[in-house]
Image (spheres, grey):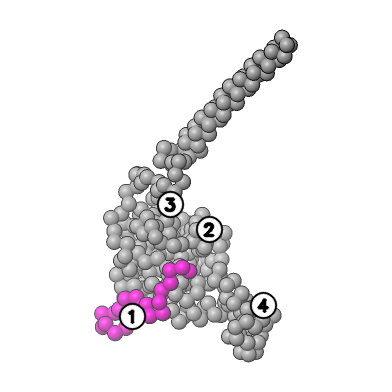
Amino acid sequence: MIKRTLWLVVMACLGISLYTIVMERSHQIEEQVIMGGVAGFAGNDYVSYANPNAEPEVVDDGLNWPDIDITLPQYSIVNNSSLLSSAFVPDLAMEEDGETYAPIYGTKWQYFEAAAKPFLDKMLKDMEAAGFTPYIASSYRTYSYQSQLFNTKAFGLFMEMGYTNKDYDEYGTEEGTEVYNAYQLAAERAKKITAPPGASEHQLGLAVDIWDKERPRLSSYTVMNEEFRNWLEEHSCEYGFIQRYPTNKLLRTGWDEPWHYRYVGIEVATFIKNTGMCYEEFYKHYNPEFKE
Ligand SMILES: [Zn+2]
């Protein structure tokens, strides 16, 4: 009997100690999780774990965002999900006669948006004064010219897949056929190399591809004249231009083009250069609904 009572007492003691240990440990764990979550990982007090759907509080990021009207044409964003219509034609710079287009400084047939052109001309002149030989490889492009560029690229890829002109003429537009599917695939691939019609900033009349005449093979940063590139990266904002597709933002913009510059005005260009953001990041601040 005594043995049995003693056994029960020992078991009860064991049970109580075990319970106490477990409770203490779980309390500790709970505390650690909270500490780690708030202080250790999230790094601020604005994240609430209680309600995962809670909106994060607006944090003053300390940046002096320009006070602008983002809906003005000079701030338009153009990419594969924000397309320009085929009817969109910018207000291109005209000669004083009001009948012929005024070409960009140093070119015969390259045109630019009227209000932005003086800034581009000035930048090109100053580049020359700094000892460079800038060359405008591309500027304003019409919707139909962009279609032509894109279709040529898509068709080239389609031919590389082993198809011919004849295949395309016979089945290229007949949904469900093997040829049709192959062409669609080629077009999808082409989108990664050449902007489809309506998706190119060049249609805005606010973008230029600036090459160095001395080093025209501009396929990547490695073949681009470094001093030339540095000058543009450093000074283009003084004329209102941003490097639109920097390498470190490739995953965000989809493009890596050191020669492609976009006019957004001096204030915005300077802000973007100083903060190191890309245009998508800038645009989203003013238009949170914007889909990239
Ligand atoms: Zn370009």
Query: Which badge, 2 or 1, comes first in the chain's sequence?
Result: 1
Q: Which residue type does callout 4 highlight?
A: Glu
The magenta segment is 80-102
**Helix, strand or loop under label 2:** helix
Residue 100 sits in which quadrant? bottom left
* Residue drawn where x is 40% and y is 53% of the image: 273
Instruction: Give the residue displayed 68% in from the left and 16% down from the top.
Output: 8
Residue 285 spot, x, y in % from top left: 37, 55
Judging depth in this view, the residue of 270 and 150 nearest the camera is 150
- As measured in the structure, the alpha-carbon distance from the residue carrying label 4 to the one carrying label 3 is 39 Å
Disc sitting over residue 202 in the figure: none
Kindly indicate whether the residue at mark 1 contacts the one at mark 4 (C-beta within 8 angstroms).
no
Question: Of the residues shown, which amino acid type is indicated by label 2?
Answer: Leu
Task: Classify 85 as above or below 257.
Answer: below
Cα–Cα span, label 2 and label 1: 37 Å
Q: What secondary structure is marked by label 3?
A: loop
- The percent position of residue 220, horizontal first and vertical second, equals 56, 62
Q: Compare marks 2 and 3 and give the one earlier in the sequence.
A: 2
Q: Which label belongs to residue 160?
A: 4
Badge 4: few (under 14), some or many (20 or more) residues near its Cα, within 10 Å?
Answer: few
Residue, x 56% and y 66% (percent of image)? 219
Q: Secondary structure at mark 1?
A: loop
Q: CA distance from mark 2 to mark 4?
A: 27 Å
Q: Main secondary structure of the magenta part?
A: loop
Residue at mark 2: 251
